[in-house]
Amino acid sequence: MKIISVVNQKGGCGKTITAVNCAAALHKKGYRVLLVDLDPQAHATFALRKVSNVYITDILEATAENLPMPSENLLTAVRDNFYLIPSRIGLASLEHKLAARQDKLQILSSFLAKISENFDYCLIDCPPNLGILTLNALEASHYSLIPLTICDFSLHGIDILKNILIMLKEFKGSHPVPFYLLTQVDKRYNFSKDFGDKVKKQLGDLLLKSTIRTNITLREAASAGKTIFEYKADSRGAEDFTALADEVEKITAQNKWASLFLRSDKFSEVYLVGDFTNWQRDERYRLSKVGEDIWSINVPLEKGKYRYKFVAGDSWFNDPHNTLAEDDAFGGKNSLLVIE
Ligand SMILES: Nc1ncnc2c1ncn2[C@@H]1O[C@H](COP(=O)(O)OP(=O)(O)OP(=O)(O)O)[C@@H](O)[C@H]1O
Ligand SMILES: [Mg+2]
């Protein structure tokens, strides 16, 4: 099961619309999909309007306390092979209870590990903050999908999220591979286009090619308790989410990804060089500047062992966030990536 958290600490940037309709689009392509509503506001639960007796609160509580799970209908069926774990407001107080525990960030991942054979994809709709629930989602996820709107694109906001990803990497050696998605795009406005161009330039390959246009039908579908495919299958919203699911499928199917970061405000450009570039600078391996002092790149790689360094101007140096290294031929070290 590939786990994708839809995350951005900013409110109203399209997380819920994305989680619900991307899950529906992947299901439409024939995948077994689980949607987890991890937001006490329960918007995704509302957007699917399903009756349930078991909520994410029950599941997290039982997992944390090692209690038996509620035995019936643990997951709420939306359709055949499309399930929801709904949320409710009590999730906010559970978050406080979890805060005291040492394993507070691993509760969700240990539950999802138990059901991972049953699904191809799990999408997690996160709350608009970077509290314990979102950290649980990031800890459990292989990928994070970060919706951005014009108003959201504050470098500061992205910086905070990046810092958390770096922290996760330092703390457990890995973090979800981040991809950004432009949402609520309105091509009628020039500033929307200028903004899109700016983001593309800045984020490079970290930005998905698909975008989600502003489409009132998406809002109507959510209010009617339906996915966009149930509500209006020939809408622009349905078209955009189908394209997004195609891209998500490609990204998650092809290779493994190495997601690398570097923190520095000294450089004007940084390249990744290594076995995969024949130790040459290559435009495809230029890092994107995703925050005031944060550089980032996602590299698709086959299974194997790779040596690499970063190059900025004349300096060649190791990845400071990777403790795996091996001696190089010049008395220094190369950073190592092992893709399994
Ligand atoms: N592409 C779109 N076209 C039209 N309306 C949209 C689109 N995307 C989102 N919206 C509307 O914008 C509002 C915010 O979207 P959404 O609830 O998905 O954001 P969110 O990031 O989950 O918010 P929160 O942070 O509160 O959880 C909703 O009313 C939603 O219906
Ligand atoms: Mg939401």
Image (cartoon, rainbow, N blue to C red):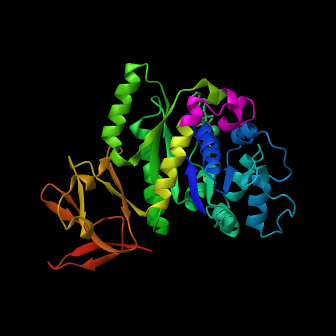
Query: Is residue 227 shown above or below 141?
Result: above
Whole-percent x, y for residue 284 in the image: 26, 53
In the foreground, 321 or 77: 77
In depth, the one of 187 and 66 nearer the eye is 187
Task: Please state the quadrant of the image where ligand 1 appears.
Answer: top right
Whether residue 156 is visible, yes or no, is yes
| Residue 305: in magenta span | no
Q: For the point 61% across and 37% down, which residue is it?
A: 17
Percent from the top left, x then y, of residue 101? Answer: 67, 64
Residue 142 place in picture, x, y as percent? 52, 60
Between 111 and 238, the residue placed more toward the observer is: 238
The residue range painted magenta reads 220-239
Is 225 one of the magenta-colored residues? yes
Residue occupying the far left of the picture: 314
Q: Along the horizontal axis of the image, is 211 left or right of 289? A: right
> Which residue does the image show at 32% across and 65% down from the upper left?
320
Tell me where residue 298 appears, x and y as whole percent: 37, 56
